[in-house]
């Protein structure tokens, strides 16, 4: 039987919820990849989730379908926008390794329409309450 962490990592999509100023969560299904004990997603830098994360690192994640229907429980965590080029490069390698041709096509499309430079990488901490995740401090 898979641990909660293995189940999370086996999911193709992750629902990432960030919080508005009034505390209302806003969830979005995203592609994700694990690397060095963190989860990474990419998104357009002008999206609401990026603006919300710049203000408040609180987030929650859950396994989900492509359409955003949850297939697992919400897990509280923190997320931040990656500022270091080396970490961004590692995140893209992990995403390309996980999604293969689909990720390369997404990269090509973003490049063709001039949006590749507008992307941001988001680093999501693996929640400590997930069995197999990092220990609680």
Image (cartoon, helix red, strand yellow):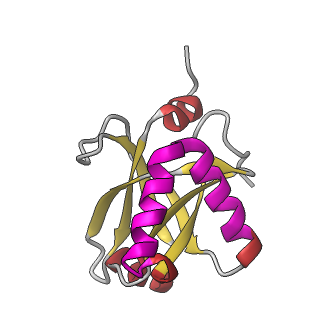
Span shown in magenta? 87-115
| Farthest top residue in view | 1
Q: Quadrant of the N terminus?
A: top right
The quadrant where residue 40 appears:
bottom right
At 33% from the left edge and 79% from the top edge, which residue is drawn? 48
At 72% from the left edge and 68% from the top edge, which residue is drawn? 87
At 63% from the left edge and 75% from the top edge, which residue is drawn? 82
Does residue 7 sit above or below 19 in this rendering?
Answer: above
100 part of magenta stretch: yes
At 39% from the left edge and 66% from the top edge, which residue is drawn? 109
| Residue 128 shows up from this direction | no
Q: Quadrant of the C terminus?
A: bottom right
Q: Nearer the viewer, residue 21 or 39?
A: 39
109 part of magenta stretch: yes
Q: Position of residue 113 (x, y in %)?
A: 36, 77
Left-right relation of 83 to 71: right
Number of marks: 0
Left-right relation of 123 to 21: right
Q: Main secondary structure of the magenta part?
A: helix
The quadrant where residue 84 appears:
bottom right
| Farthest front residue in view | 112
| Residue 77 shows up from this direction | yes
Q: Nearer the viewer, residue 62 or 45?
A: 45
Q: Position of residue 35 (x, y in %)?
A: 69, 51
């Amino acid at each position: 039987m898979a641990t909660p962490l293995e189940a999370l990592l086996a999911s193709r999509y992750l629902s990432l919820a960030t919080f508005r100023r009034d505390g209302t969560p806003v969830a979005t299904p995203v592609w994700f990849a694990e690397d060095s004990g963190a989860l990474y997603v990419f998104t357009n830098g002008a999206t609401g989730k990026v603006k919300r994360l710049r203000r408040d690192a609180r987030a929650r994640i859950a396994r989900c379908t492509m359409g955003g229907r949850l297939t697992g429980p919400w897990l509280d965590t923190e997320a931040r926008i990656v500022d270091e080029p080396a970490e961004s490069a590692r995140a893209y390698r992990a995403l390309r390794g996980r999604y293969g041709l689909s990720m390369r096509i997404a990269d090509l499309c973003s490049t063709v329409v001039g949006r590749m430079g507008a992307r941001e990488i988001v680093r999501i901490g693996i929640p400590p309450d997930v069995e197999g995740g990092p220990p609680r401090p």
